[in-house]
């Protein structure tokens, strides 16, 4: 469905990607580095197949053109946003849990 010869538009391919990979990314926040590397490979393969790009095109250029941050950056942004929301929560216990520093 997301391959090179798919009849889907690039916009619909990107939406499908966001629903499948990005929706699952909060689960992988504490995953092993090897697992994150596998997710990067999946993301790079998707961006290359969806755009039908040649092998000479760098992955960073594909991510920039598709406006996709890397998996690591996306998960970091999601975590940062989560803790910012938690610090503003009216419950004092949640605020204190969000503001603690890991040892």
Image (cartoon, helix red, strand yellow):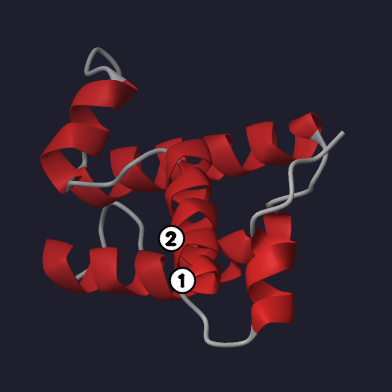
| Residue highlighted by disc 2 | 81
Mark number for residue 76? Answer: none
Considering every residue shown, the one lying at the far top of the view is 56
Residue at (41%, 38%) from the top-left corner?
70
Task: Tell me if residue 57 comes above or below residue 2 in the rendering.
Answer: above
Q: Position of residue 10 (x, y in %)?
A: 15, 62
Q: Nearer the viewer, residue 5 or 14?
A: 14
Task: Tell me if residue 99 comes above or below residue 6 in the rendering.
Answer: above
- The label nearer to you, 2 versus 1, is 1
Residue 20 in view (yes/no): yes
Whether residue 10 sits left or right of residue 75 in the image: it is left
Task: Tell me if residue 91 comes above or below residue 52 in the rendering.
Answer: below
The quarter of the image holding the C terminus is top right
Considering every residue shown, the one lying at the far front of the view is 92
Task: Tell me if residue 49 comes above or below residue 20 in the rendering.
Answer: above
Q: Position of residue 21 (x, y in %)?
A: 51, 63
- Place residue 56 in its image quadrant: top left
Q: Callout 2: helix, strand or loop?
A: helix
Residue at (46%, 73%) from the top-left corner?
88
| Residue highlighted by disc 1 | 85
Mark 1 surroundings: few (<14), some (14-19) or many (≥20) residues within 10 A: few
Considering every residue shown, the one lying at the far right of the view is 103
Labelled pair 2, 1 in contact (Cβ < 8 Å): yes
How far apart marks 2 and 1 lie (CA) works out to 6 Å
- Place residue 42 in its image quadrant: top right
Residue at (46%, 71%) from the top-left corner?
85
Q: Callout 1: helix, strand or loop?
A: helix
């Amino acid at each position: 469905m997301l391959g090179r010869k798919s009849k889907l538009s690039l916009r619909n391919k990107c939406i499908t990607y966001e629903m499948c990979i990005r929706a699952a990314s909060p689960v992988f926040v504490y995953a092993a580095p090897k697992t994150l590397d596998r997710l990067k490979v999946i993301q790079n393969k998707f961006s290359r197949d969806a755009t039908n790009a040649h092998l000479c095109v760098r992955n960073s250029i594909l991510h920039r053109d598709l406006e996709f941050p890397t998996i690591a950056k996306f998960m970091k942004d999601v975590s940062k946003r989560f803790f910012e929301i938690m610090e503003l929560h009216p419950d004092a216990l949640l605020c204190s849990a969000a503001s603690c520093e890991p040892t």
